[in-house]
Image (cartoon, rainbow, N blue to C red):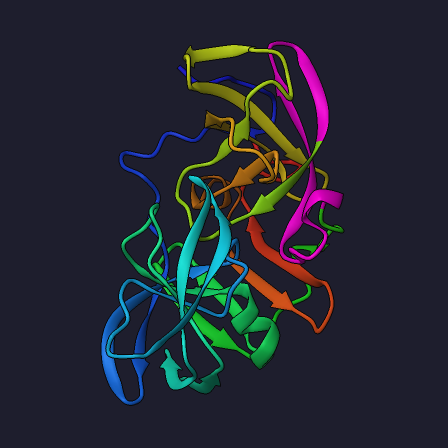
Amino acid sequence: MLLSCAKCVPLLPPQPAALFTTPLSIDGTPIGEAILDTGGGYELILRERFGLPVVGRVDVLSFGGSEFMDITGEFDYTAGDVSDHADFALVGTSVCGCNGVGFQFFRKTGWVLALDFATMRASFVRTFPLDGAVIPFAEPPDTLASFDTSFVEVTVSTGGVSGSVLALLDTGTNTSVMRRGILPDGSRLTPNQTEILISEPQLGTIAVTARLFDTPDLPDLILGTDAMQAWSDQWYFHFAPEGGTVIAEPITGGPGSD
């Protein structure tokens, strides 16, 4: 059983929350769907080379820890209805045999990522509403100073103890995770899973079952589409040349909700 609270929306999905994707083509050839990943510090990631030359390798940090990945040469691509030119792409990752469109795509092209959980449709738009919750991105943690993406300040409560945590809103995962030890054990379900309450002044409070992790150098709290869907049906991620804004409407877990 999940935690309960006043004005709190419990998260009881019958199955893991879905991830949003968009069709991806390379040099005019469709290669399948790509996950839209606001937690990915890249422009594109590919599950394989798709005939592109490999020009080097780079050390990257993923949920599984540090790993080396191939990088390709430059190429043209189309993500959804947006065409552009990439200087390179990352190839393969141990945590996902998938293609991905990261937040650098949105920062580079200026398109806004719009997500609708009611229809499970994602789109790229130029304008976005300014009602609902309008939350500027917080500065990234010092240990991830160059990882300038959708961080927000939230209050996390478990076991009667609360604390302020810098959380990453990550559309590239459907499971929220929290670093082991940043708060007391609280309502531990298993050795690697705990119940927490997450509050944000504009979004309100939700209950989430979070996995616990120990990988160094990652954000202390990563909120996936499970948490986002509990808060709101519609989200917009606007990546400005520096910083950005996340907009959520309507607020299902906000002040005044039962």
Residue 50 in the image: state x and y as whole percent: 24, 75
Residue 20 in the image: state x and y as whole percent: 37, 59
Q: Give the residue at x 42% y 12%.
A: 191
Judge whether 103 appears above or below 85 on screen. Answer: above
- Foreground pick, 188 / 66: 66
Left or right of 122, for residue 14 = left
Left or right of 83, for residue 147 = right
* Residue 229 seen in this snapshot: yes
**Residue 160 lies in the magenta stretch:** yes
- Foreground pick, 35 / 2: 35
- Quarter where residue 253 is shown: top right
* Residue 127 seen in this snapshot: no
Residue range in magenta is 141-164
Left or right of 152, for residue 21 = left
Judge whether 224 appears above or below 209 on screen. Answer: below
Q: Give the residue at x 48% y 75%.
A: 124
Judge whether 65 appears above or below 207 on screen. Answer: below
Q: Give the residue at x 41% y 80%.
A: 73
Residue 23 in the image: state x and y as whole percent: 30, 74
- Quarter where residue 90 is shown: bottom left
- Foreground pick, 97 / 68: 68
For the C terminus, the image quarter is top right
